[in-house]
Image: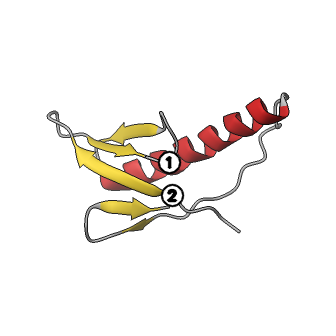
Amino acid sequence: MKAKFNVVVERDEDGYYVATVPSLPGCHTQARSLDDLIERAKEAIELYLEVEKEIVSGAPSGGGREAVTASPTPDGRASL
């Protein structure tokens, strides 16, 4: 089963889209387009979870990744 995360999407003063995952402290990314932002947000979440797993287990995981699906919501957020 894939985990789902709420992602807050905002636009900064330079026109970049910025994604923040409130439930994963320090997990954020940015991009010029929403399509790129969604891909980068997926990657940021995957990497965050991979590092968290390594910290808990005390050893590198070897790169086993799980796909994350993103669904935009009407209020400007994305459900991953």
Q: Residue at x 54, y 64 (%)?
A: 69
The answer to the question of whether label 1 and label 2 lie on touching residues, with beta carbons closer than 8 A, is: yes
Q: Residue at x 62, y 39 (%)?
A: 47
The residue indicated by pointer 2 is 5
Residue 36 point in image, percent of width and height: 39, 49
33 sits left or right of 58 in the view: left
Q: Up-down: is 57 above or below 65?
A: above
Instruction: Tell me the colour scheme of the image.
Output: secondary structure
2 sits left or right of 22 in the view: right
Name the kind of residue labelled 2 in the image.
Answer: Phe
Name the kind of residue labelled 1 in the image.
Answer: Ser
Closer-to-camera residue (58/73)? 58
Residue 16 point in image, percent of width and height: 24, 40
Closer-to-camera residue (23/45)? 23
28 sits left or right of 1 in the view: left
Closer-to-camera residue (22/9)? 22
Residue 26 point in image, percent of width and height: 47, 33
Q: Residue at x 85, y 29 (%)?
A: 59
Judge the density around disc 1: few (<14), some (14-19), many (≥20) Cα neighbours within 10 Å. few
Q: Residue at x 37, y 56 (%)?
A: 35
Q: Up-down: is 66 above or below 18?
A: below
Q: Which mark is residue 31?
A: none
Q: Helix, strand or loop at disc 1?
A: loop
Q: Which mark is residue 23?
A: 1
Q: CA distance from mark 1 to mark 2?
A: 7 Å
Q: Nearer the viewer, mark 1 or mark 2?
A: 1
